[in-house]
Image: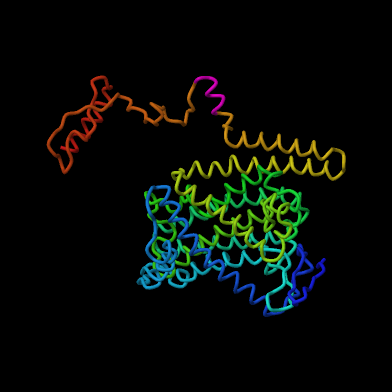
Amino acid sequence: MIGMISTSSIGVLTAAIDDPELSDFGKDAWWVILLKAVLIFVVLVLLTLFNIWWERRVVARMQHRIGPNVHGPFGLLQSLADGVKLALKEDITPKAADKIVFTLAPVIAVVPAFVAFSVIPFGPVVTIPFTDTRTPLQLTDMPVAVLFVLAIASIGIYGIVLGGWSSGSTYSLLGGLRSSAQMISYEVAMGLALVAVFLYAGSMSTSQIVAAQDDLWFGLILLPSFAIYTISMVGETNRAPFDLPEAEGELVGGFHTEYSSLKFALFFLAEYINMATVSALATTLFLGGWHAPWGIVHVWPGANEGYWPVLWFFGKVLFFIFIFIWLRGSLPRLRYDQFMAFGWKRLIPISLVWILAVGTIRSISLEGQIDRRYLLIGIGVLAVLFLAMFFFGEDAEQAAERAAGTPATDEPVLAGGFPVPALPSGGPVRGAAAPLVFGRPESSRATVPSDVSAADDDRVTTEERIDG
């Protein structure tokens, strides 16, 4: 598999492009594995600091502000200053908290975020500088690498749930439960969106999925899966407009309300690394991984050789992170019941139907009973239909009621587009201002309309007698 290595007159090694295979992993020396692990850790920490700064600058530009611009050139050291500030803050542990679990929860949340990057491919097989060692730009790989990422990401949910439970606060507990329900629900849709990729790549190995996209990216031929995954990854990472566990008007700050100092910094770090993880997974599965964007290879044949693919990989990852930032600066927060209903009633059923369609088309294609051009046309038509269902579909009950001209029974009457509650049975409440009676004005009590029944009149009179 490993290509020929051409040695120049001055002894510099240059390698042709090599797609790594599963047999290339597990053979590295201990120092190579340690070097890769340290580099992944350093890159993720630096990427988090950059993403925080980038988010603040982009949102500031969207809101016609300046953003961080004091610490370092262009304010690049602002994130580092914020990290030092968090470390120097007082570390408070509530009296009602379970201290051991309260301390372990941020660690449980942040460790899986780092581990998930161990199977992400950053580039082809390369030569380590100043050595003759050849190794893939990937820590490790396995036949079920994508399932490994999903499993590790699920472990991080335990940190969020335990953090909310161990705080001894009702708001934190509700935030942890809401966050876990949201992440589990959208992980189901995310996992279903990846089945079509497995069918086309014929493997769950991340390096093999990247190699299967040499000619055409799966994000183009599996557009519905790409759209479902993109929506699911925003919901799974609790980012706006799906940051419902941190709805200030309902749950104050979510599962980490009672956290401070470095414990809060770990939760913050886990959130941003999870953003990078789902973005890297989207790049690997749908946008060709570390392969250069289409057209560059025709102009520059060496675009996929050496360490240049690392640039293409992180460029695609930053594209997805920009989508995260763009959504946060543009869209308002959803209502929780609407968000959960969208995941269970729309994303998951559409994913199941799409998997059935892709499986059928893939089976026909492998048996050679249909021309490839007609296959691509069929996939395009299905993609358009699914996108139409995705954005313009509605429940059958609501459609039937709208056709009949009657509003839904559980929907409030709309006046000018706003929900209006039903009026009391006796009509609007009327009453004049009156002096305070037992700390509240008499006008705040219900008055008896002129057309109520005698039984209602007796009831209200009794209430007035009690108030008096």
Q: Is residue 180 above or below residue 90?
A: above
423 or 292: nearer the eye? 292
Query: Please, which colouring scheme is shown?
Result: rainbow
- Residue at image coords 60%, 72%: 39
> What is the residue that sits farthest to the front in this orientation?
9
Image x and y of residue 296, in percent: 69, 52
Q: Is residue 173 magenta?
A: no
Relative placement, left or right, of 5 versus 387 is right
Q: Residue at x 77, y 69 (%)?
A: 24
Pick whichever, 458 or 211, lies toward us: 211
Q: Is residue 143 left or right of residue 77?
A: right
Judged from this view, the residue extending furthest toward the right is 368
Q: Where residue 342 appears, x then y in whole percent?
A: 55, 41
Q: Is residue 399 magenta?
A: yes
Q: Nearer the viewer, residue 346 or 71?
A: 71
Instruction: Identify the magenta region.
Output: 398-405
Please indicate whether residue 30 sits to the left or right of residue 394 in the image. right
Q: Quadrant of residue 344?
A: top right
Q: Is residue 161 visible?
A: no
Q: Quadrant of the C terminus?
A: top left
Which residue occupies 45% across, 45% down? 333
User: Residue 259 in the image: x percent, y percent?
Assistant: 40, 65
Q: Position of residue 168 (x, y in %)?
A: 40, 63
Up the image or down, 361 lies above or below 397; here it is below
Number of numbered discs on residues: 0
Q: Is residue 41 above or below residue 325?
A: below
Quadrant including the N terminus: bottom right
Dominant SS in magenta: helix
**Can the viewer see residue 130 in this picture?**
yes
Q: Quadrant of residue 341?
A: top right
Q: Which of 322/174 is in front?
A: 322
